[in-house]
Amino acid sequence: MGKIKLAIVGIGNCASALIQGIEYYKKHNSPEQVPGLMHFNLGGYLPGDIEIVAAFDIDKRKVNKPLKEAVFAKPNCTKVFFSELPDYSVRVSMGPVLDGVAEHMRDYPDDKRFIPSDAKPVDVVDILKKSGAEIMISYLPVGSEEATRFYAQAALDAGVAFINCIPVFIASNDEWIKKFEEKNIPIIGDDIKSQIGATIVHRVLTKLCMDRGVRITNTYQLNVGGNTDFLNMLNRSRLASKKISKTEAVTSQISHDITADHIHIGPSDYIPWMNDNKVCFLRIEGEIFGNIPINLELRLSVEDSPNSAGVVIDAIRCCKLALDRGIGGLLISPSAYFMKHPRVQYPDEVARNMVEEFIEGKRER
């Protein structure tokens, strides 16, 4: 069915895992050979059909470097599971820094933080048009409000579909949705769910409690890790949208009132030696029959970036299907299933059925 021409903003751990995965599944090209995908064939598109045609970053160790080198450059620290990357024709372009780098990162070792390049930013819209990109995916750091809006507008100006993987509210904001609808350009967002991550597990367990008649009285989700995402989030001022996104993803599954004092969801701390491993500590307290208390605790440990790539690879292909069908604006079904903060929240089993219907062409969006 042809290639899916993709531009990537932010060549960090998430991009590294995605790019390695594209090549990994291109080599292991049958579902019997390898696990790990929700869909091996999605609407006629395989993972290996994704072609990277443009890349943007601001770190001096990546800017103007060949893509195959940049994905393994510091401060990237995700596990390397497929190192045999081809000689892509793509070099990483310098994007505008804007609010993409938190000030406190200067206090940390070079191999753990972003080091902005002094290169002049490129004309992003021009690069997108010349590259032939059809879809742009944003892996900007949490808290990059200004930068996310810049790239969303660049997608509109270049006529490129947009997938927003971070918790800045674009695809869940009515004004931005209208802009994409007016230009008939697909958009999916906001804030990617991992394949088996803290948010999806918390949602499923919360829904289980509701379905089984448990009244939740208190719950928390604490996450620790050692990648640049966790280092970036030490600046709590960058976390407002992140906390809203993760909290609403869980509270949307609770059918009774619960006040903010009784639910806490968010990152806890940065532990450098953990690198891209993320550990979630989750607790749910509730009341069962006769108001008898019940407590549930869970510990989840997972390599963070490949965990999100397993979902992103489907979001990209759903976006391509919309382009093929001439459908623009908010893709409601993919956003509901793949994202923590969609415009409308649905139970996960409902959202999954919606996505399957979208893939089959039975649902327009």
Image (cartoon, helix red, strand yellow):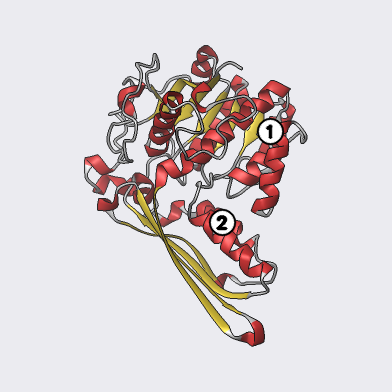
Q: Reading the chain from its start, which is encountered first: label 1 or label 2?
A: 2
Task: Please give the name of the residue rendered at 23% of the width and 40% of the height, measured from the top-left corner.
Answer: 110
Q: Quadrant of residue 10?
A: top left
Q: Eyeballing the image, is 206 above or below 349? A: below
Q: Is residue 149 left or right of residue 257?
A: left
63 lies left or right of 110: right
Q: Check the picture and name the quadrant holding the N terminus.
A: top right
Can you give x and y, in whole percent of width and height, for residue 356 in the image?
A: 69, 39
Residue type, mark 2 in image: Ile
* Residue 54 visible here: yes
Question: In terms of depth relative to the viewer, which is nearer, 187 or 295?
Answer: 295
Look at mark 1 in the image and give the residue it sits on. 359
The residue shown at (32%, 24%) is 84
Q: Residues within 10 Å of mark 2 (few under 14, many from 20)?
A: some
Disc 2 target residue:
244
The residue positioned 74% from the left and 28% from the top of the image is: 182
Q: Secondary structure at mark 1?
A: helix
Q: CA distance from mark 1 to mark 2?
A: 29 Å
Q: Amino acid at mark 1?
A: Ile
